[in-house]
Amino acid sequence: MATIRDIAKKMGLSVSTVSRALNDNQRISIRTRKRVKRIASEMGYQPNYNARNLTNREANAVGVVFPVNNRVIDNIFYVGLLRGINEELTSRNYVLSVAIGNSTEQVLENVKSMITRAQIKRFILLYSHINDPVIELLRHQPVDFVTVGKPAAGQKWPYVDNNNVKAGADGTRLLLNNYHAEHPIFAESPNGWPYELDRREGYLREISQTDRKPVIFSVPDQDNTALDQFIKDHPQIDGVVATDDYTGLKLYRRFKTLYPNKEINVVGYNNSLPNELIDQHFHSVDLHPAEMGQAAVQLLFEKETGSARVKHTIVAHSFFN
């Protein structure tokens, strides 16, 4: 196997120049870096990333932090995110390391260990919550991080997201124009996440352009009694814009249980439900999570390439069904 010394000897360069070129040091011209990498590839050179990162006191790994949420494990949206992240990291000779737990305290301890013991200096959080202790930890550590989902108002860091205001408006417009809903409501979770607020804003924007009255309902996680009572109080509902697929499916099933002969169309988000759980009246907006995962890695490494740090990346959405 060829070494840096072999490459340097063949090219008539110093070992330090070859090493810097292979590590994309900005002091080496782009032309020289390309020549060195081409010769290294022809000679079958394989970099020792462990040795390089030991010198830099940084692991060739990126920490991927999951939200504390009982829907995470079986949600294919997160699988799509991981697929995109892993594909982009592999092309950079990095691997992913996952932080996941049943409580915020567990995840926080996991991330602390990643920083202090594993020497991980880059993180991607698959969520963005206000006053989140993991985010607060990362903000005060010598690390870089990106979130999937925009920060709450007043907070600033790089993020990847969809245009959720537009997504909420598009979902509402689909119900009004394509499925002729006369009484569409907006169903959200009790959490008040930033993307929910944006999708609600899109719903309200579209409804305001009609003579309809907006109706917003926070679907409880456990209490079906409150959900059933809401449905009974609003039997005229014929359309739902739900903040995500699971919220939409829960409301849809309860509605059909109470009114099996009434037709209702639901628009959810994330394209995260197996086909056998839905029918022709359930429509999902595809947020392209694999593309979001790739964009998160690209944003995370943007600083390293010497270009100015991009503040955020917006990935387009499309209707899946």
Image (spheres, rainbow, N blue to C red):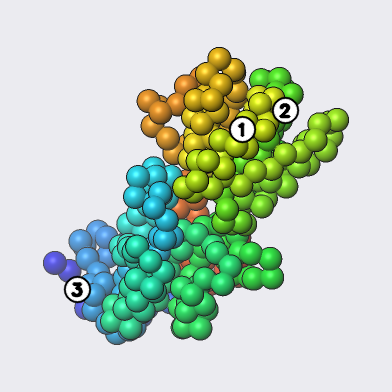
- The residue depicted at 76 percent of the width and 38 percent of the height is 214
Q: Name the residue under label 1.
A: 231
Provide residue 172's location: percent of width, then percent of height: 69, 33
- The residue depicted at 31 percent of the width and 78 percent of the height is 113
Q: Is residue 194 toward the left or the right of residue 18 in the image?
A: right
Q: Is residue 96 visible?
A: yes
Q: Could you tell me the amino acid type at mark 1?
A: Ile
Distance (Cα) linking label 2 and label 3 = 70 Å
Q: Could you tell me the amino acid type at mark 2?
A: His
Query: Does 81 sit above or below residue 104?
Result: above
- The residue depicted at 63 percent of the width and 70 percent of the height is 156
Q: Is residue 278 toward the left or the right of residue 4 in the image?
A: right
Q: What element carries label 1?
A: helix
Distance (Cα) linking label 1 and label 2 = 12 Å
Q: Is residue 320 visible?
A: no
Of residue 190 and residue 283, the one placed in the foreground of this image is 190
Q: Mark 3 points at which residue?
A: 3
Query: Does 272 sit above or below residue 112?
Result: above
Q: Is residue 117 toward the left or the right of residue 152 in the image?
A: left
Question: For residue 43, which quarter of the picture?
Answer: bottom left
Of mark 2 and mark 3, the one earlier in the sequence is 3
Q: Could you tell me the amino acid type at mark 3?
A: Thr
- The residue depicted at 71 percent of the width and 20 percent of the height is 180
Of mark 3 and mark 1, the one earlier in the sequence is 3
Classify mark 3: residues with Cα within 10 Å, few (<14), some (14-19) or many (20+): some
Numbered tag placed on residue 183 in the rendering: 2
Classify mark 2: residues with Cα within 10 Å, few (<14), some (14-19) or many (20+): many
Numbered tag placed on residue 313 in the rendering: none
Classify mark 1: residues with Cα within 10 Å, few (<14), some (14-19) or many (20+): some
Provide residue 124's location: percent of width, then percent of height: 44, 64
User: Contact, CB < 8 Å: mark 3 with mark 1?
Assistant: no
